Amino acid sequence: MTTTQAASMGELQERAHGVEHDYAKGSPHIRHHAVRDRLITSLHTLVQEVIDRNGQCRVLELGAGHGTFTDHLLAAGARITVTEMSTPSVRFLQSRFRHNPNVTVLHDQSGGATCRVGPVDAVVCISVLHHIPDYLGTVRQLVERIVPGGAFLSAQDPLWYPRRSRLSMNLDRNAYFLWRLGQGHFRRGLSTRLRRMRGVYDETNEADMVEYHVVRNGVDEEALRDLLAPAFEKVEVQRYWSTQSGVLQAVGERVFPPTTFGLIARHRT
């Protein structure tokens, strides 16, 4: 990510995740029991495995939002440095964890705060990589900070569009559209959808640029796996169905094709 890209992305994140932003309402797919429970279990397992190997687990959590999963990392026994681009989110995190010495909050408006972070035992990116234009370059830099025996976990990123079937793409988009009908801001959502269908993206509009995966065609899970494979003993990609609607999530888990993926790389060499 260039300095200009990072600066503009920071401004867009600020607008998209202001004081009134509700991360839980804005990311309802992570609240579904099947998705959430699987992710929480993965976090606890990862932290415990790293502690067993390294005697500690220093975690760098990118884009922590309001700390939804920071609490679970803490409960598992980790010490955590969290980063956030949005100033209101940083202030919320600082207030929430002000009495906890095991949490350090970094304001990462320029996208370069991780350079100030020392060696870590694990990196966690939950619903983050699809916001980053150069996510492969970012992951490459993050891996350099992970010590031997450490781990990398990402979750809740959209699969690479070119490898998905038309059925997968249509079910995903229609499920989102149905959920959007009940959320308000319908006119704005419809306008954004029509622009995307025409392949038109406004670089000054947070609705287009913050959800950067629609510009770039998702996140290439296989390219990520190949990037991580030389640095870790085991890399596992987990593909699954995920959508905002609770009803469609329950149905989709049984019968719909995957839309989303998580990735766990274990035992840094």
Image (cartoon, rainbow, N blue to C red):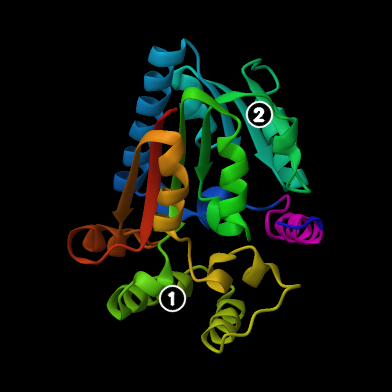
Determine the CA span between mark 1 and mark 2. Answer: 34 Å
- Give the farthest residue toward the top: 55
Q: Are marks 1 and 2 in contact (CB under 8 Å)?
A: no
Pick out the residue farthest to the bottom. Answer: 198
User: Where does the C terminus fall, quadrant-wise?
Assistant: top left
Range of residues picked out in magenta: 4-19
Which residue is more in the foreground, 15 or 228? 228
Q: Which residue is mark 1?
A: 177
- x and y percentages locating residue 176 in the rendered image: 42, 71
Left or right, residue 200 beside residue 127: right
Would you say residue 63 is visible in this rendering?
A: no
Q: In percent of the image, x 41 and y 49: which residue is there? A: 225
Q: Position of residue 209 (x, y in %)?
A: 66, 68
Residue 90 location, x and y as percent?
72, 39
- Residue 17 among magenta residues: yes
Compared to residue 150, the image places residue 183 above or below, namely below
- Magenta segment main secondary structure: helix
Q: Secondary structure at mark 1?
A: helix
Residue sitting at 31 percent across and 54 percent down?
239
- Quick check: 198 left or right of 95? left
Q: At 42% from the left edge and 66% from the top edge, which residue is drawn?
A: 160
Sequence-first tag of 1 and 2: 2
Three-letter residue code for mark 2 = Arg
The amino acid type, in three-letter code, at marker 1 is Phe
Q: Which residue is mark 2?
A: 96
Q: Quadrant of residue 36?
A: top left
Quarter-wise, where is residue 139 in the image?
Answer: top right
